[in-house]
Image: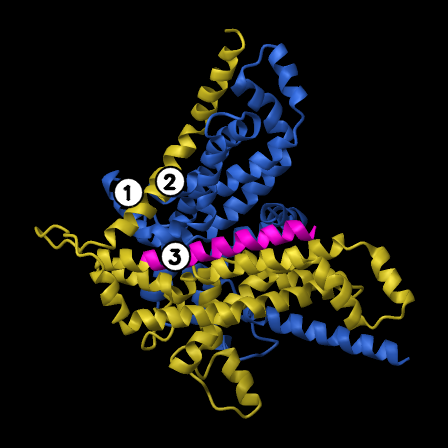
Chain colours: A blue, B yellow
Amino acid sequence: MSGRLTKLISTITVWLFALIWALPLLYGIWAAFHPSAFATNFDLFAPLTWKNFERAWTAAPFARYFLNTVLLVLGIMAAQFVICTLAAFGLSRWKFFGAELLFALILVQLMVTPDVLILENYRTLQNLNLIDTLTGVGLPYVASAFGIFLLRQNFKSIPKELDDAARVEGANTLQTIWRLYLPLARPVYVAYGLVSVSYHWNNFLWPLIVTNSVETRPLTVGLQVFASVDQGIDWSVICAAALMTSAPLMIAFLLFQRAFIQSFLRAGIR
Amino acid sequence: MERTKPQLNIHVQGWLLALPAVVLLATFTHVPAVSTIIDSFFSTPHGRRPAVFIGLDQYRTMLADPIFWLALKNNLLYALITVPIAIGLALAMALWVNGRIKGRAALRLAFFTPTILPMVAAANIWLFFYTPDYGLLNQIGRLFGFASVNWLGSSATALPALMAVTIWKEAGFFMIFFLAALQQVPPVLYEAARMENARRWLTFRRITWPLIMPTTLFVAINALINAFRVVDQVIAMTGGGPNNATTLLLFYVYQVAFSFWDTAYAAALSTVLLSVLAIIAILQFFMLDRKIHYR
């Protein structure tokens, strides 16, 4: 009997904790879907409204910011796939001269991420004439140590006999990668893609430094500009804008929870 | 001859395949890291006056710069407080969600969702949450008779308020690693513990805790690295204020480089940040070594 009671108490405690944990977000959602008058005033029968989203959408060029972010994350992902696949294939399959040293040097980037080197990288972009371009925002992230590492681990588990078979069939290296490794490593690409897209959808500091116009600003920077300059303190509209910028990722996450969690997990375990 | 030819081919092909990655990594990681360190020994060029070698002068300035010391202190506090709390909460969440509790899926969703939000979006929602007088936090406080607190506006509470956001955002992410680790613990061990009538705490300490140690270390290292790269919420929520109470290392680098344009001093500050990350890397190296022995 007392065992059941303690269990009930601990269940209630956990649920209470989860509720507190969800509170800031629920509060933001409450404010976004109610008229400003109800933002800090809780009334279960307060009227629901889309107005805050409409106002946010028209008050700043969010459509353009969305386009920029989508182009950015897809561009980075595609470039990462190509560049990391090529490097990972060489490193996983051949003991070429200097391969181990090269791999060690690549791993340095896991620690020294581009956001720590903002100053020098900004100068490099200036020299390349890429300031305020989407290419400039993405370029430092394209050769990702993390991606190379992840793909290399996976390629190593693919039996070498399959390579030989492909070669006997007359396939060259690129054809082998395309026809054999890509299909076999598909789950890893899905995982890496999800992690990469979430990371760059949310990335802030580097795009904040590199972009200074509506045509290049991604959502995160656009939201910050909107919340700090264009807007008074109408919290309902700011909350609506914040939710709007997160919505695509959140909806994707709700739909494919398992895939997301598996991906983060697979990506995290080294 | 026939034997050496494919060998050579492998060397050339290997480097050719790695070439795009090598060029990009060198351009955006290795070369800038080295030139950051070199720049820290020069003066900041102004107009026509080029940078001149000044040895350790930037570092002397740094030692005499109270904001640097404050940023370093704030950042160390940030790491010392957020890392253990985030790990502890993450582990607790994982244990709860892993157990036979009602509504596990909903709980997991509540814990993990903050991870998916962009930090800037989360920061803006938390700004509202912290608003003096009207914010939810103060409204709840008022119910219990507390006076309104300007959480982000006073030096005493601003840094802890930012820490709460970091913990909120990270704990759910770390939870999934603990969840995976817990599911790897052989159930036989728990059955044995039950037969011995071991208490829950003892079971946790003797079985669960040692077996998930590698995960704890991994999560701790990652949390530590993240703690020294915190900047988004500082920019979005406080701008380093009030009175630099929330200035952290990377934010100070950003401020010195892109608001004050004292690039050489920013290089010296970046060098400190790079050193901190290098120390963590060395730490990780030795700890991962231990982990392998453990297994």
How far apart are the two marked residues, 2 and 1, measured between alpha carbons? Answer: 9 Å
In the image as oriented, which residue stretches furthest toward the bottom? B145
As displayed, is residue A173 above or below residue B246? above
Q: Look at label 1 and name its amino acid.
A: Leu
Give SS at disc 3: helix
Provide the residue designation for mark 1.
A125
Give SS at disc 2: helix
How far apart are the two marked residues, 1 and 3, measured between alpha carbons? Answer: 25 Å
- Residue A213, position in %: x, y? 29, 50
Residue bounds of the magenta highlight? B270-295
Local crowd size for mark 3, using a 10 Å CA cut-off: few (<14), some (14–19), many (≥20): few
Q: Look at label 2 and name its amino acid.
A: Leu
Provide the residue designation for mark 2.
A139
Q: Earlier in the sequence, mark 2 or mark 1?
A: 1
The chain holding disc 3 is B
Q: Would residue A42 be found to the left or right of residue B43 on screen?
A: right
- Residues A34 and A245: in front is A245
